[in-house]
Image (cartoon, rainbow, N blue to C red):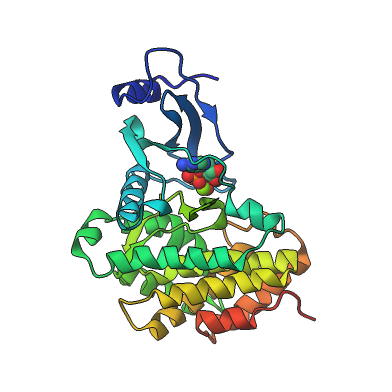
């Protein structure tokens, strides 16, 4: 394995590794970053370095400064509860950083795809996301620390909402209004990528990774984003426990809302969930496992029906069907 000289120098300067050979072992096929595991005298660490262009079929350019946003999010989340994010050990050249490696913690997506569906864990995810939102709501300091509107537009609003609007004349007005509403709300610190593939299952509950899209914005987005993944997996697997997990996530999140009226937030999250569901079958970033045309139809039909006639996310989840005639 070729050790990247800048990264190794940075690790040495931070005192994380000694003068001997340093092996950077690639961790995953991440599309947006190089992610390596590195053995150090004090245990394994993870080094993550953002790529200037994402490794996906359609071209996505993304500023590497998102590495610094991720570090900020991880530190801020740990400030409330140290169990919910990995400890950042050092910032490195190129907006890279080192964090502690969490051993023996599977990725939640892998657990779900293998049929290990635990609504209790989903509830802990809801509680964890809501805790970060509650801790940062209406906070000028956090707002100033995450001035990432442009990045959030480029990586979330445009590919997920506006891309679909450009290809669907009928739904375009509703989707454009939804996108405008989303970017206008400055309520709390949003993670921006709360997907089961970015959550580790630890003995102490969920650990959130991959906060490159963090922005001060509408907390409904995180709830909608994660719920969308569970509803897609409900259709893919046909397993009613996925619906139960989605309901548990929403209920636990709702119990943590103390910064605004929950009715308003749940309705915004319902609208966003419908749009994100459609984006995952029609958009720029389709769910890779939803390849069966029948599964796509089930998602598309339910999502399209709800965009012009939105319902709060708890109702959307309760009414979500895994099969339709
Ligand atoms: N601190 C950590 N401890 C253990 N494993 C980790 C840690 N950080 C990352 N990983 C592993 O590396 C994977 C990729 O990490 P991350 O999601 O941060 O990178 P990414 O390049 O943004 O990925 P992707 O684009 O695929 O979402 C995680 O799914 C997880 O398996
Ligand atoms: Mg990831």
Residue found at x 51% / y 63%: 160
| 161 is higher (above) or lower (below) than 152 | below
Q: Quadrant of residue 61?
A: top left
Furthest residue in direction front, as rendered: 203
Number of numbered tags placed on the structure image: 0
Q: Quick one: 197 or 131, which is closer to the camera?
A: 131
Seen from the viewer's position, the closer of residues 70 and 288 is 70
Q: Relative to 159, is 239 above or below?
A: below
- Outermost residue toward the right in this view: 325
Taking depth in this image into account, of 180 and 232 the one nearest to the observer is 232
Question: In this rendering, does residue 59 appear at all?
Answer: no
Q: Is residue 80 visible?
A: yes
- Residue 53 location in percent, x, y? 47, 41
Q: Residue furthest top?
A: 20
**In the rendering, at what x and y percent does residue 317 appear?**
59, 78
> Left or right: where does residue 146 sit relative to residue 62?
left
Quadrant the N terminus occupies: top right
Q: Tell me what residue is drawn at x 24 percent, y 59 percent.
A: 142
Pick the quarter of the image with the C terminus.
bottom right
Q: Is residue 122 above or below residue 62?
A: below
Residue 220 percent coordinates (x, y): 42, 72
Name the residue at 37% across, 54% down.
151
Residue 199 point in image, percent of width and height: 52, 53
Question: For the point 29% across and 22% down, which residue is it?
Answer: 13
């Amino acid at each position: 394995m070729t050790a990247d000289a800048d990264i190794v120098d940075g690790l040495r300067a931070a005192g994380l590794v000694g003068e001997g050979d340093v092996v950077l072992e690639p961790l995953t096929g991440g599309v947006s970053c190089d992610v390596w595991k590195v053995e150090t005298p004090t245990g394994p660490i993870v080094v993550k370095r953002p790529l200037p262009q994402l490794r996906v079929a359609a071209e996505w350019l993304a500023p590497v400064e998102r590495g610094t946003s991720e570090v900020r999010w991880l530190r801020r989340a740990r400030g409330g509860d140290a169990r919910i994010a990995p400890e950042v050990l050092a910032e490195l050249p190129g907006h890279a950083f080192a964090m502690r490696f969490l051993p023996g913690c599977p990725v939640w997506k892998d657990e779900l795809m293998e049929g290990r569906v635990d609504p209790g864990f989903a509830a802990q995810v809801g509680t964890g996301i809501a805790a970060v939102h509650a801790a940062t709501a209406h906070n000028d300091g956090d707002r100033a620390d995450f001035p990432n509107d442009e990045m959030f537009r480029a990586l979330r609003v445009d590919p997920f909402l506006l891309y679909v609007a450009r290809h669907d004349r009928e739904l375009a007005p509703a989707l454009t209004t939804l996108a405008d509403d989303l970017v206008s709300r400055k309520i709390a610190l949003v993670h921006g990528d709360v997907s089961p593939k970015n959550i580790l299952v630890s003995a102490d509950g969920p650990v959130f990774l991959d906060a490159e899209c963090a922005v001060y914005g509408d907390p409904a987005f995180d709830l909608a984003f994660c719920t969308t993944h569970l509803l897609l997996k409900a259709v893919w697997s046909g397993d009613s426990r996925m619906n139960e997990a989605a309901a548990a996530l929403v209920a636990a999140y709702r119990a943590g809302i103390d910064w605004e009226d929950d009715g308003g937030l749940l309705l915004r999250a319902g609208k966003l969930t419908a749009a994100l569901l459609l984006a995952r079958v029609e958009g720029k970033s389709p769910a890779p496992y939803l390849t069966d045309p029948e599964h796509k139809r089930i998602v598309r039909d339910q999502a399209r029906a709800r965009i012009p006639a939105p319902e709060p996310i708890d109702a959307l989840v309760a009414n979500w069907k895994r099969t339709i005639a």
